[in-house]
Each structure stands twice: as C-alpha cells, then as structure tokens.
Image (cartoon, helix red, strand yellow):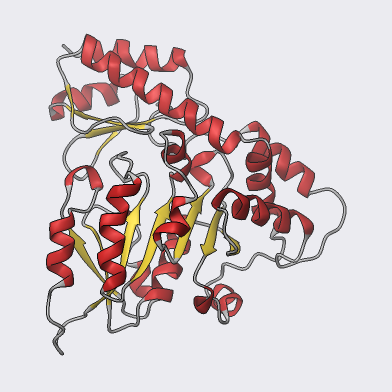
Amino acid sequence: MRYDFGSDNTAGMAPDALNGLVAANSGFARAYGADETTARAADQIRQRLDADAEVRFVFSGTAANAIAVSMLAQPYEAVLTHHAAHICTDETGAPGFFGQGVGLIGLPGYSGKIDGRALQAALDEPVVGHRQPAAALSVTQATEYGAVYSEEELRHLIEPAKQAGLGVHMDGARLANAVAAGFDLKDIPRLGVDVLVFGGAKAGANCAEALVIFNKSLTRRIDNRLKQAGQTASKARFLAGPMLGLLESNAWETGAAHANLMAQRLADGIEERSPFVLAHPVESNAVFVRMPDEAHQRLNALGWACYQFDDGSVRFVCSWATTEGAVDELLEAIASLN
C-alpha cells in the first residue's frame, strides 16, 4: 500500500528538520526547555508572528489543542467551533478530558469555515442553568477541508466572539499551508487570538507542535499544567530542534508551498482526466473528491491509501515530500477507474 496521499503526516521528517534534530543532539544542554535550541525556536515563532508571546513545545496537536481550550473555558462552559473541527471529530474527547468537562458546540459552515450567522445565533443564546454556555471560539487555519480563512473572514468571527467575552483559540496544524496560500501570520495576534497551536508535524517536523500564548493572563502556572498533562519533555530540545531547523531555513514555508502546488496539480489532473468532481475548493494541500464507494475501493485495491472524510468525499493530502511523479502515478490510477 502506498501512503503518499493518505495524509501529510505519513511523510518523514524534512531534511532541515532532521538536521535540526541532529544539531540539538550535540553535547549537553539544560533540561525541560531551558536550553538554547528551545529558546531560538521560540524566538523564530515570535518573530514570524511579531508578538511577545509565551511559547511551549509539546508532543502532539491533540494535546496542544486540548490544553489550549481548557485554558479558555471552565468545566461548566463550552467551546464554539466548526462541527468538523479536529477538536470535535478526532481527539477522543481530549478537550473535555483536559478541561475536566469542557463542552464542544459544533457549528455549520462550508469547507470547514464557521458560518458567521450560525456563530452569531450561538452567541445570542441565553445563558441558562442547565446547559454549558459558550466561553471560547476555536477556528482552524487551514481548515480540515483545506480551506484558508482570509483576514476579513476571521475578523468577522473573532470580533463578535470577543465582544461577547469569549476567548479565541486557533488550531494551526496546517498553518504553514495557509501561509503558503497567502495568509499573514501577523494577523493572528492582531485579530485577538488568545492561544495558537503552531503546527510542526505536518510541516515536516517529527511530532512537535508549539503552544503559543498571546494572552499573558493565561500563562499562570502553564508549566505546571503541561507537566501534569505529560507534555513537559525532559529533553525538550529534541522537540524544538526540528522546528528550529524548519524555521531557520524557511523550509516551514517552502515545504508547505510545495505541498500546496502538488495538491493543485492533483486537482487539475482530476478535473481534466477523470469523471469525478472536487468536493471543495483546493486552497492548501488537501484535495477532496466525490467518487462512488466502488471507485474508492478499487483505488485502495490498486494500492493507494486514501479514506472517506466526514462529508463522504475522498481525501488526498500532499506534503513537503510529495513528488510530481507520485501525483502523476495517482492520476493514472484515478483515470483508470472510468
């Protein structure tokens, strides 16, 4: 089975990330994130965001997201998000676990983007004693369906949420792909995001993600929170090192740009050479295709790993490592399904 397009986490580490890991392995260093590699990686993130933020490196996006939303909502409160958001569909209740009961309220919207009218309706809901009131908003950039929010679209969601007193979390697992599509990282703190998950694993790192906290009032005892959650690495430089390698070389951006380009090549080929249609606009590194179950099963039988997503479409994801040759081979297989 070929996993080239199963997800962007099926690729190995990018060369610059691996170089960063090897460099971090040299000699002795202070433990628990007090080392130079971790400090330099955190500075790289702050510089890109143009913000004085607290940065911590953790082992997974699920942990980063769950801890982030638990910082914004109490156990008797809830988080508003898209109904297909990763925190709703792919984290096994982790936000509620880390938040000791924090609830999730899923909202509709095309291609994973929250519909502004649905958000406003949720914000207008009266607070009553028998259900969890909204305390935070969570948005994903790029979305689970590969869509990229514009600054204006985010502003129209975040401003009313802030006016209603909600905190704001951004899941940036594929933030690099959004940046490669034209999104400006500096808009994140300007828009009022309180906590950002700055993605590394899908951008070519190992398992590292960065928790970026703009709202300093949320940082009280953050290290205690992370330690209790099992997210404080004694050799933290091995989380930060690959991120540093990607960021100092700009491979975080260039790898994502390549992934986006390969996704567009795949999408163009599907439209030109197959009877299948795209389910969502291709704006980052993911391609969603409407195809019958039989065609999907035949494609799997031909050795291509891809799976049916929440809306019934079949998802293909490109990465920094995707080659033009692999795209063309997949297109040949898809075209043969006629």
Counting from the top left corner in percent of width and height, residue 3 is at: 42, 30
Quarter of the image with the N terminus in it: top left
Please give the name of the residue rendered at 68% of the width and 41% of the height, measured from the top-left corner: 248
- Picture layout, residue 242 above or below residue 159: above
Q: Is residue 248 above or below residue 281?
A: below
User: Which residue is located at x 37 percent, y 48 percent?
Assistant: 141
Asked if residue 200 is positioned above or below residue 136 in the image, the reply reads above
Q: How many marks?
A: 0
Left or right of residue 248, residue 117 in this image? left
Quadrant hosting residue 281: top left
In x, y percent, where is residue 245? 68, 41
Q: Can you see residue 336? A: no
Horizontal placement of 305 versus 68: left or right? left
Q: Quadrant of residue 54?
A: bottom right
Q: Quadrant of the C terminus?
A: top left
User: Which residue sits at x=87%, y=52%?
Assistant: 27
Relative height, residue 125 to residue 51 (above, below): below
Residue 259 rendering spot, x and y as whole percentages: 45, 28
Q: Can residue 198 be seen by looking at this rendering?
A: yes
Where residue 51 appears, x then y in whole percent?
57, 59
Q: Residue furthest right?
A: 27
